[in-house]
Image: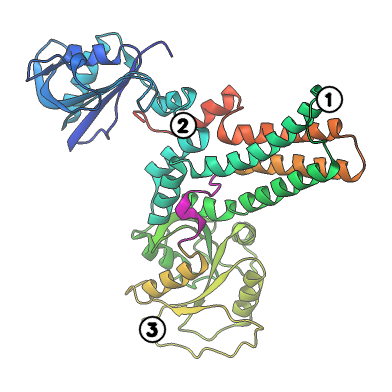
Amino acid sequence: MSDTIAAIATPAVPSAIGILRLSGPEAISAVSAVFRPLGGKALEEQEDRRLVLGELLGPEGEVIDHALATISHGPHSYTGEDTAEVQCHGSPAVLALGLEALFAQGVRQAGPGEFTRRAFLNGRLDLTQAEAVADLIDAETPAAVRQAAGQLAGALGRRVGAIYDGLTDLLAHFHAVLDYPDEDIDPFRAETIQTGLTGARTALEELLATYRRGRYITGGVPCVLAGRPNAGKSSLLNALVGYDRAIVTDIPGTTRDTVEARCRLGDVVLRLIDTAGIRDTDDAVERIGVERSKAALEEAALILVLWDGSVPVTEEDVTLLERAMDRAPVILVRTKGDLPSAPMPVLGLAQMPPVVSVSAKTGMGLDKLGELVATQFPAGGAEAAGELLTNARQAEAARRALDSVDRAAASLAAGVTPDALLTDVEEALSALGELTGADIREDITARIFERFCVGK
């Protein structure tokens, strides 16, 4: 990281403000060469984090904009290095000329997420905080914003750190007794190990239990629209996403494959999956679609079972409802509410799911549907503090830590000597280190930052 990087940190569309960002040993001198303060005092001599008014110069030294600039000396900056920013008008042409002028000073184009990656490598952020930066940029709901902001503030890192510290204390005690037998140190007893392992196991189980909620907040809830052919699944999907994502006709069996789209209902983002109508069919292509529909039901976190509310309920409708209720939370949606309604039968189910009548044509009932979805995935709770696991990498590391703790506990119960079972404790610490980034391979780090945008 001996070189200096620069990037346009705002979208490449006309806007009120555009930002050029730099980080590295030559960041301040490079921006000083292309920015002329109007007060006469050189930018390098200005106070850190103070906005200075001046002129932004292009590749030929010409004035291309009146702008603001600020500098920050490392290590007290976002990346831990010397950094600088220029805030100008958001013309893509102005920003491109400004970046070209900076390149002429010897800086290079930053890669995706390189600023945040430098912050991680320089110890300004742990890995959970770095991932929260991308989550905050991608946040679609207030709940997602609260989770990412709390994680960026270090809430998840502190939670993991408490487990890490407890296991470290266990190892340190053992090695102290082993290495300094003549010192007045409390002996290392089986009860001590058991207490430490039990506490770590409980904390890890509670942490892993947050993953379901965390991944739904950041990635959306997998929600299957299921029903017989022509029940209105594609029409409802189009109404929810606000455009014609799926083909709609009066011909049963139009949808032959799963169709996916995202929508937001209240504080919940749904990953809608429109499926082929589930029925017995001799059509080979439609039959493949039906099988894919059944597979989608297995992966759903929420199932909207659609019944055509304008026609009598069939045995197939009831069978599908029962099958769905065995797999995930269900909301029964009676479609085509703008048409005369058929009677709702008494089903005799042990527990009836929530029911809502909607019309994709008029929008009737969609707000009520959103309210019912919110009851299945309520806002609030631990996510406000940013302590949830939000991606598969984090959950996998926590799972390996838990498995290692379980192996250590099993070894203890089997009478294995402490030095042998503490090898599993070390593996648990290594897994937790991967979660926060204290101990992680370079290829994993590179893969994480690939999802970031340039300039962040």
**Foreground residue among 407 and 203:** 203
Left or right? Give the position of 291 relative to 177: left
Q: Measured from the top left, where is residue 161 in percent x and y? A: 59, 39
Looking at the rendered structure, the kind of residue marked 3 is: Leu
Q: Quick check: can you spot residue 132?
A: yes
- Magenta span of residues: 380-392
| Position of 77 relative to 102 (above/below) | below
Q: Residue at x 92, y 43 (%)?
A: 414
- Specify which label sits upstream in the sequence, 1 or 3: 1
Q: Quadrant of the C terminus?
A: top left
| Mark earlier in primary sequence (2, 3) | 2
Circles 2 and 1 in contact, beta carbons < 8 Å:
no
Query: At label 1, which amino acid type do we have?
Result: Pro
Q: Amino acid at mark 2?
A: Leu
Nearest to the eye among marks 1 and 3: give it: 1
> On the image, numbered disc 1 is attached to which residue?
181
Task: Name the front one of labels 2 and 3.
Answer: 2
Q: Estimate the x, y position of residue 278 in percent, counting from the top left.
A: 60, 68
Q: Residue 60, image x and y in percent?
A: 13, 10
